[in-house]
Image: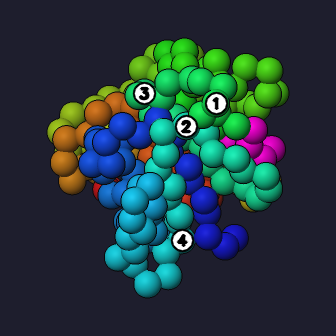
Amino acid sequence: MGQITIVHCGVKNKNGIMSRVLRRALSAYGGVQWFDGAAVSCPDQTPRFLLYECTGIPQITSGAGILVFDNGFVYSQEASRAFSDGFVPILEGENKEAAKALKGTGKIAVTCSPSARGTLSIASLDYERAAVSLQRDLRILDGSVVEPMEIIVGLSQKTPAYPLMAACGILLLSGVEGSYYF
């Protein structure tokens, strides 16, 4: 699989916690090039991941990738456009604005929740370590299926639950299985 495109929707602050966690995780598993609306940064020579940060949903006409909704995402028809069937959405289970954007699209989202209702849930979380549970089968970008499992994540710094689960979802969808450290 070539470079994997991730679109982070709802960004209010390019140095917000979700942006920092995603860049930290993606840097650890193949490198990341990112565009924050003003500048392109690429500390890695051949990054596996391309991260685009934007306030709404950009027009995506083809290809595959991952669409991650920040909890700051605000739905508006003007700022939300159609996106390719190859893009898998990730959202926090209580994000009603992201749910509005997905309504009627037929997209199956990866939901992140503190309870077992989500596709991904937190089994435990402390300063240095977390356990994230994949609650059901997950079809990943290459078409294969990952079965339910527990993912142990070593943390280099304090990380909130939703950005942690979103990063794990991206890595799983990208075919990176096992324990993580970021």
Question: Disc 2 and disc 4: Cα gap in Å?
Answer: 24 Å
Q: Are marks 2 and 3 in contact (CB under 8 Å)?
A: no
Q: Which residues are magenta?
A: 82-88
- Would you say residue 35 sits in the magenta stretch? no
Residue neighbourhood size for the residue with mark 2, other residues' Cα within 10 Å, grouped as few (<14), some (14–19), many (≥20): many
Q: Looking at the image, which is closer to me, 112 or 40?
A: 40
Q: Which residue is mark 1?
A: 78
At mark 2, the secondary structure is loop
Which is more N-terminal, label 3 or label 2? 2
Which is more N-terminal, label 2 or label 1? 2
Q: Looking at the image, which is closer to me, 119 or 13?
A: 13
Which is more N-terminal, label 4 or label 2? 4
Q: Are marks 1 and 2 in contact (CB under 8 Å)?
A: yes
9 on left or right of 143: left
Tell me, for residue 71, which label it has, or none: 3
Which is more N-terminal, label 4 or label 1? 4
25 on left or right of 144: left
Residue neighbourhood size for the residue with mark 1, other residues' Cα within 10 Å, grouped as few (<14), some (14–19), many (≥20): few
Return the x and y of residue 163 as percentages of the image width and height.
38, 38
Question: Disc 2 and disc 3: Cα gap in Å?
Answer: 12 Å
Of circles 3 and 1, which is in front? 1
